[in-house]
Amino acid sequence: MSIAEKYARATISSNLRDDAHHHNTESLAAVALSDPDKINGIGHLLMRVKVANDASSYPALSVKWTVIVESKSINRKWPSHVVAHKVAKASLDHFLNDRCPICTGIGHLPLAGASRPVLSDDPCPACNGQGTRALECNARTLDYVQSMVETLHDLMRHAAGRAMQKLSNDMEL
């Protein structure tokens, strides 16, 4: 089970006891404690908003992400037609809601008329089996938005890796 799955399970748990038989709080604590200012403190917010559907954390995430993108636009000398706050919004919105609406992220459509749920061998025609929707933005800014979406994925992986490292360091072997 990935850290994202553990985190999601913990956020909806009605029992957050932490004893010999209950470990739901471990992933929450690991994510919270493993996200130093080294990466602008955005990893735990990404987890909270994307994985746990915590809409109350979205404004803080949006502000921090916009600052990061504006900094990147200056450092990378983006052309004047690329507006950093628009790239930040488009990339964050896509990252948070990237599932294909047709196959709901599975990559294949269910077969019609089957007595039980069975998926087609053919890939979803909308996403070509990728499970993600196409990036919707101006063609002139597509590469910039795509790069920032990849950066968000990297930040999420980094935060998850640090949380897993925190969990493994705390384990008694």
Image (cartoon, grey):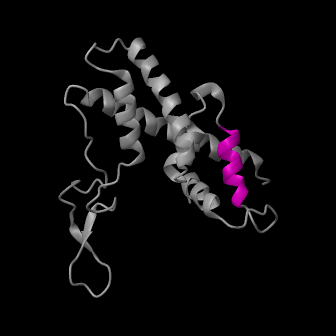
**Is 31 part of what is drawn in magenta?**
yes
Question: Residue sitting at 27 percent across and 41 percent down?
Answer: 135
Q: Quadrant of residue 95?
A: top left
Image x and y of residue 151, in percent = 43, 32
In the rendered view of the protein, which quadrant contains the C terminus? Answer: bottom right
Q: Is residue 129 left or right of residue 30?
A: left
Instruction: Look at the image and give the residue range highlighted in magenta.
Output: 24-34
Image x and y of residue 127, in percent = 23, 53
In the rendered view of the protein, which quadrant contains the N terminus? Answer: bottom right
**Residue farthest right in this picture:** 19
Of 122 and 102, the residue lying toward us: 102
Q: Quadrant of residue 119?
A: bottom left
Relative to 60, does residue 8 appear above or below in the rendering? below
Relative to 37, does residue 123 appear above or below in the rendering? below
Of 63 and 125, the residue lying toward us: 63
Question: Residue sitting at 25 percent across and 31 percent down?
Answer: 142
